[in-house]
Image (cartoon, coloured by chain):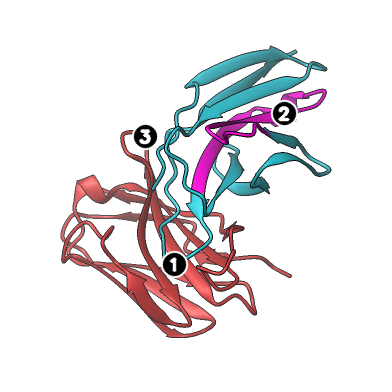
Chain colours: A cyan, B red
Amino acid sequence: LAKTTQPISMDSYEGQEVNITCSHNNIATNDYITWYQQFPSQGPRFIIQGYKTKVTNEVASLFIPADRKSSTLSLPRVSLSDTAVYYCLVWSNFGNEKLTFGTGTRLTIIP
Amino acid sequence: DAGVIQSPRHEVTEMGQEVTLRCKPISGHNSLFWYRQTMMRGLELLIYFNNNVPIDDSGMPEDRFSAKMPNASFSTLKIQPSEPRDSAVYFCASSLEYGQGAHEQYFGPGTRLTVT
């Protein structure tokens, strides 16, 4: 299981674009990159998943370079409600591999 | 859809008592997961089921913990006897069948357990 490394915390002002980078140097061919968001007193919520290049949905974009050893979650024009912990996970599409949450990145949006 | 339902939302009990946490997964989901979250250890996977069958319980801390899934719409996590170090938020999550690209897990609101 590829291990991920991401910053423990980040601060940003409202209205700015926030980029959270995750390192996964040992990512395997079958691995996908998945991001979850967790608000205080709630369970994590799936945000986005990708395998390579770029994925975009209504919430975020995920950028994955060609070597796939890192990925960047991009949140456009953040608001106070985006204050949460963001988890980067690497997960294989085959077998019964466990989904392992690390410590995540605590993002604080400043008014 | 009501989402994943957990009960109770809060539980306070004394050391040595039995605690039972309950979960109703999203209808149609074949995989169910139990997690525990603490400040010290973060979010840990305890056990997960595929089609009501336990697949991996290696995350269960010790024999005091047990989980069952008697049918597709109900699961329990039991702690007997409970200890103060079991205090945590316990999450249940469900997804389409695990191991086949089912990357998206839907989490319940959690049960906050306090053992005094």
Q: Nearer the viewer, residue A6 or B27?
A: A6
Query: Label 1 sits on what residue type?
Result: Gly
For disc 2, the marked residue is A74
From which residue to which does the magenta span run?
A: A64-90
Residue sitting at the far bottom: B71
**In the rendered structure, the residue with mark 2 lies on which chain?**
A
Circle 2 or circle 3, nearest the eye = 2
Residue at the spot x=59%, y=64% of the render? B101
Q: Are marks 3 and 1 in contact (CB under 8 Å)?
A: no
Q: Are marks 2 and 1 in contact (CB under 8 Å)?
A: no
Circle 3 or circle 1, nearest the eye = 1
The answer to whether residue B116 of the structure is visible from this angle is no
For disc 1, the marked residue is A95
Circle number at residue B73: none
For disc 3, the marked residue is B39
At mark 2, the secondary structure is: strand
Q: Is residue A22 above or below residue B17?
A: above
Q: Dividing the image into 4 quarters, which one contains the C terminus of chain A?
A: top right
